[in-house]
Image (cartoon, grey):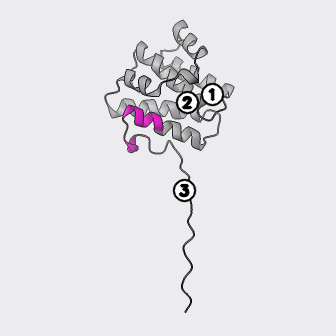
Amino acid sequence: MAKWTAEQLKHIADILMAAAHADGDVQKVEGSAVREVLKGLAGGALSKDLAARIDGFKLAAFDLAGAAAALKLGDAAARKDLLLLVARVTESDDVHDLEESDFIVRVANAIGAAREEYAGLTITLEESVKPPPLPAS
């Protein structure tokens, strides 16, 4: 797992809170998952600043491109670590829907991740097309 700076943790907190909102219904378990993830990344405890950032998160003010740019993720391992954290939050309510998969893809695109870096973290809906009828003989 990547080692994150205090500055990066602020932006990760924002991304994870946005992930909790991805399906339009923030469950208590998702908020708890964000806190637990960040506690682990911060060495076991949330700073007052980080806790306040989580509590004050406003989805309408969230800027994914800005948060992604501020992280300055230089390698595939760090990008994959972040995407795994996002997936952990989206799956914390035991439901993973298309909106959550879409959010993971949006984060991946914002941080410059290749498809292989988020393979297995998303679902897609494939439309079945009925083949045309065979010609009569």
Q: Which residue lies most toward the front here?
A: 60
In x, y percent, where is residue 83?
46, 33
Q: Which structural element holds mark 3?
A: loop
The magenta segment is: 106-120
The N terminus sits in image quarter: top left
Q: Which residue lies most toward the left here?
A: 74
Q: Residue 126's mark?
A: 3
Q: Is residue 36 above or below residue 50?
A: below
Q: Is residue 115 above or below residue 72?
A: below
Q: CA gap, disc 3 to disc 2?
A: 23 Å
Contact between labelled residues 2 and 1, with CB atoms less than 8 Å apart: yes
Q: How many marks?
A: 3
Horizontal side, residue 7 vs residue 86: left or right:
left
Q: Magenta includes 94?
A: no
Quarter of image, res 79: top left
Badge 2 density bin: few <14, some 14–19, many ≥20, Cα 10 Å:
many
Q: Which amino acid lies under the numbered mark 3 shown in the image of this protein?
A: Glu
